[in-house]
Image: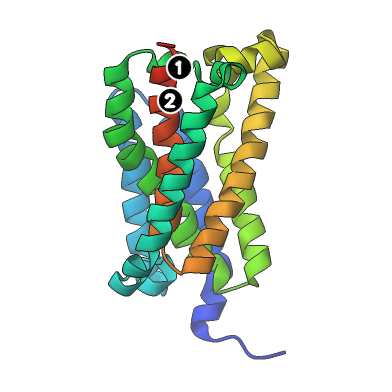
Amino acid sequence: MAHLTAIDRLHPALIATIVFVIAAANLIAHYAHGRAIFLVIPTTALLLGAAALISGLKWKDLGVTLPQLRAGLPWAAAVVAVVVIVIAVAVAIPPLREFFLDERFRSARTALFAALVVIPFQTVIPEELLFRGVLQGALMRTWSAPVALIVGAVLFGLWHITSSMNLAGGNRGLRDIVGGGSAGQIAGVVLAVVATTVAGFVFGWLRYKTDSLLTPIALHWAINATGALGAAVAWRL
């Protein structure tokens, strides 16, 4: 077996630390109140990113060097265009429109603010920096690409347990399928974890394929933001 370098020996501990910090931030954000709700995840992403760089990861491992970001631009534009088209078609079809009836986005103003401010800066950029930047960067330096992508995807799915506990209750279309009460809540969480695990694998693959963090950021934002805007439109049709 080849000898591990000093930086390689650090990676198992670094990965464990990253996972612990991400899990702790998730729980803190879930139970926080006031402004802390909006600050916990972005602050954690910045601090963990800085700590990872100090611990031995490089900017290139995070996918955020200027050449990497430039390389991701064409892919970013393409995935955003595809998502916008898919969401627009889905909202236009009555049976599918039901799944966009999210109570949080009844107001067009709320949906627009979420799409342009809350979603990119509180959710998408911090989560992508955490999962496809820091975590995937560390995993790729330690394990093979398939293992790194699968582990990252599963952890990303589990990350969404807390945020999906009221998913069925707030979405009419989903509630009609899984029902209400505790059983509906559990079913909603399971569906959310499965869906976000698959999404996490796609995000991770795009990060690996394009060597740029910009591409998964663009896809993640497009899905969430156009979903919010699509909900506002759906409520008015």
Identify residue for label 2.
Answer: 230
Residue 83's spot in the image, x, y percent?
47, 41
**Residue appearing at x 38%, y 26% in the figure:** 229
Give the residue displayed 61% in from the left and 53% down from the top. 201
* Mark 2 residue type: Gly
**Residue in the image at 40% along x and 55% along y:** 76
Which residue type does callout 1 highlight? Answer: Ala
Give the secondary structure at mark 2: helix
Q: How far is mark 1 from mark 2, CA to CA?
A: 6 Å
In-front residue for pair 41/222 = 222
Please indicate whether residue 32 sits to the left or right of residue 143 in the image. left
Q: Which residue is at the front of the view, 117 or 46?
A: 117
Mark 1–mark 2 CB contact (< 8 Å): yes
170 vs 137: above or below: above
| Circle 1: element type | helix
Residue 14 point in image, percent of width and height: 51, 65
Image quarter in which the C terminus is found: top left
- Across and down, in percent, residue 170 comes to 52, 14
Q: Is residue 61 left or right of residue 20?
A: left
Question: In the rendered image, which quarter contains the N terminus?
Answer: bottom right
In this view of the protein, can residue 58 be seen by the observer?
no
Q: Quadrant of residue 55?
A: bottom left
- Disc 1: which residue: 234
Residue at x 49% of width, y 62% of height: 207
The residue most toward the bottom is 2
